[in-house]
Image (cartoon, helix red, strand yellow):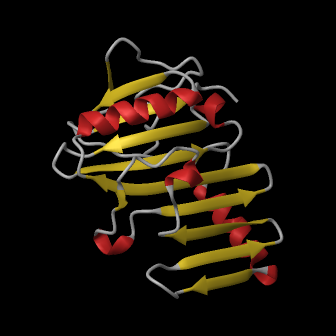
Amino acid sequence: MKAGITMSSLLAVLLFGATGCNVKVDKSGDGDNVKIATPFGGIAVKKDQTSAADLGLPAYPGAVTDTANDGNRSAKVDMGFGSFKLRVRVAHYKSADDRDQVLAFYRKALSGYGNVIECVGGKAVGGLSTTREGLTCDSDHDHTTSHGPSDLQLKAGSSRHQHIVAFGNGSSPTEFTLIALDLPHGFDNEEKGTN
């Protein structure tokens, strides 16, 4: 885990705070929602309630939410313990339009967050390999996103504040995932090997 917090210290905080812990699980509807609150912070996970607007991006015209895989493709995750804050938003869509049309739409939409880089299999393609804010195609080496050798991603922002549009293998219909990551303070420094 990043920002000086290890998994064991996070578990210790959760266990230590268990005496004042409030856990709420809502299994209504198609998804499970979990909220854990302790005196030190908490975690909230909401599945299947994320839209493009939640990520600060426009919805592609005519695209529909992809509910394959039991509808578990979209989610909101918020975690906060003191100064450690993590926020992840994911929305999965499909469109009858070809991938190039969707790519062009999101290349323009992402430009509102700065330079846009294009990555295939985790490697930069095209003329730009790093955003002005320092985001690269391999900035997800901590497995915040995964990619196969032919998967395509558009990225904008910085290592701490990323907006990503990820495409599958180019099949029809076009499937794409919108991702917004707000990573903990210090993440970008630790990624560069400093604190």
Residue 154 appears in the rendering: no
Residue drawn where x is 58% and y is 69% of the image: 45
Q: Residue 5: percent from the left, percent from the top?
A: 66, 50
Q: Is residue 169 left or right of residue 118?
A: left
Q: Residue furthest bottom?
A: 28
**Quarter the C terminus occupies:** top right
Q: Residue 172: percent from the left, percent from the top?
A: 16, 50
Q: Residue 68: percent from the left, percent from the top?
A: 28, 68
Residue 26 appears in the rendering: yes
Q: Is residue 171 left or right of residue 165?
A: left
The quadrant holding residue 192 is top right
Q: Is residue 99 left or right of residue 64?
A: left
Does residue 15 sit above or below 182 in this rendering? below
Count of labels in the image: 0
Residue drawn where x is 62% and y is 44% of the image: 183
Residue drawn where x is 58% and y is 61% of the image: 77
In-front residue for pair 183/46 = 46
Q: Residue furthest front?
A: 62
The quadrant holding residue 23 is bottom right
The quadrant holding residue 17 is bottom right
In-front residue for pair 124/17 = 124
Does residue 162 sit above or below 67 in this rendering? above
Residue drawn where x is 35% and y is 60% of the image: 64
Q: Residue 144: percent from the left, percent from the top?
A: 46, 47
